[in-house]
Every structure is written in C-alpha cells, then in structure tokens.
Image: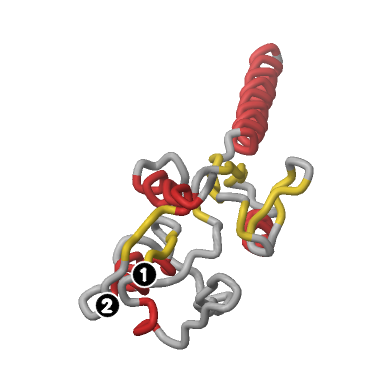
C-alpha cells in the first residue's frame, strides 16, 4: 500500500511539473515576440505621416492590419530620412519600409514589393509665367530632386539626351 501511495505521489508530482513547464513555455513564447522595425519618413501624406506623435496613413494602416493579431511579431515604427530607409533595410536596422515606394526594376532585384496600391504621376512645377511642355524644354535647366526617389530617376534616365543640373532639395532652402 505504501508503494502504491508513493507511486501515485510520484506520478502526480511528475504530471504537475510537466504541466507547469508547458504553461511556462507557453507564457514565455507569447512574451518573446520578434519586434519588426518599420521605417518611414513620416512625411508623405496620405501614405505616411505623424499626428500628435502617432504614426498615421495608408501604408501605416496596412502594416498595422497585417500584424494586428500576430502571435509572433510586434511592430514598431520609426521616422528616418527617406534616403536612408533602404540603406537601413540593407543594414538590418529596419525590417520593413512603409513609405509609398515606387517600384522599379533595380529595387525589385534587391527588395520585395507588395502589389501596387497607387499610381504616381510626374509633374513639372515652375514659377508663375514659366511654361514647360516637355522634358525638351528643361534641357540645361536646374531641377531639385529628392535623393533615392523615382522622381530623381526621370531626369537621370533622359540625361543622355538632355542636359540637367541636379541639386538636392536642401540647396533650395534659405
């Protein structure tokens, strides 16, 4: 009888320990989510922007919706300069970029893109009274570009035909 008592006690203790370990393992796996850092310049409304220190915009909402009920990942957003976002992805500082990136073949060789969610149209902005009808009219002029943007590639792609002077946005500021 004594042996039966100790055998049942040992089985009960073993089951209790196993159950406790399983519970601890479950709790610790829930607590050890991987944090994904999402980079944005927070300056391309309506896609990404900040409102009272909260990240907002279509791209932000999409990322939040994808990871809303994730048991594996937490998402944190950071603001950084646009031209450093992809370098940050390359250096693994960020795992996702949410910034209304335009697709191009060069980027697609290196990065994964979602399906297109919008279409960007290029436009020429000039002083009142100045009229440009085509890129031919811009030959020899100075233009501003945002480094790393697809908009910067249009004049560069036509540079063999037309002569453009490139300047960064900052060079036009007082």
Q: Position of residue 2 (x, y in %)?
A: 69, 12
- Residue drawn at x 41%, y 48% as measured from the top left: 89
Residue 66 shows up from this direction: no
Q: Position of residue 125 (x, y in %)?
A: 54, 72
For the residue pair 157 and 108, the one nearer the viewer reads as 157
Q: Position of residue 69 (x, y in %)?
A: 69, 53
- Residue drawn at x 37%, y 61% as measured from the top left: 111
**Element at badge 2?**
loop
Looking at the image, tell me whether mark 1 or mark 2 is earlier in sequence order: 1
Name the residue carrying label 2: 162
| Residue placed furthest toward the bottom | 133
**Quarter where residue 120 is shown:** bottom right
Which colouring convention does the figure follow?
Answer: secondary structure
**Quarter where residue 157 is shown:** bottom left
> For residue 51, which numbered disc appears in the image?
none
Quadrant for the C terminus in the image: top right
| Residue placed furthest toward the front | 129
Q: CA distance from mark 1 to mark 2?
A: 10 Å
Q: Is residue 134 left or right of residue 48?
A: left
Name the residue carrying label 1: 141
């Amino acid at each position: 009888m004594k042996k039966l008592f100790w055998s049942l006690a040992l089985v009960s203790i073993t089951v209790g320990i196993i159950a406790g370990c399983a519970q601890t393992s479950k709790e610790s796996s829930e607590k050890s989510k991987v944090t994904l850092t999402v980079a944005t310049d927070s300056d391309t409304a309506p896609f990404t922007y900040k409102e009272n220190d909260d990240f907002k915009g279509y791209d932000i909402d999409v990322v939040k919706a994808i990871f809303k009920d994730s048991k594996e990942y937490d998402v944190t957003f950071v603001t950084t300069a646009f031209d450093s976002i992809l370098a940050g992805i390359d250096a693994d500082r960020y795992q996702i970029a949410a910034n209304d990136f335009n697709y191009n073949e060069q980027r697609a060789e290196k990065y994964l893109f979602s399906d297109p969610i919008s279409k960007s149209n290029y436009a020429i902005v000039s002083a009142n009274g100045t009229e440009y009808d085509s890129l031919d009219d811009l030959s020899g002029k100075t233009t501003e570009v945002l480094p790393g943007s697809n908009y910067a590639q249009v004049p560069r792609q036509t540079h063999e035909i037309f002569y453009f002077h490139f300047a960064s946005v900052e060079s036009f500021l007082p």
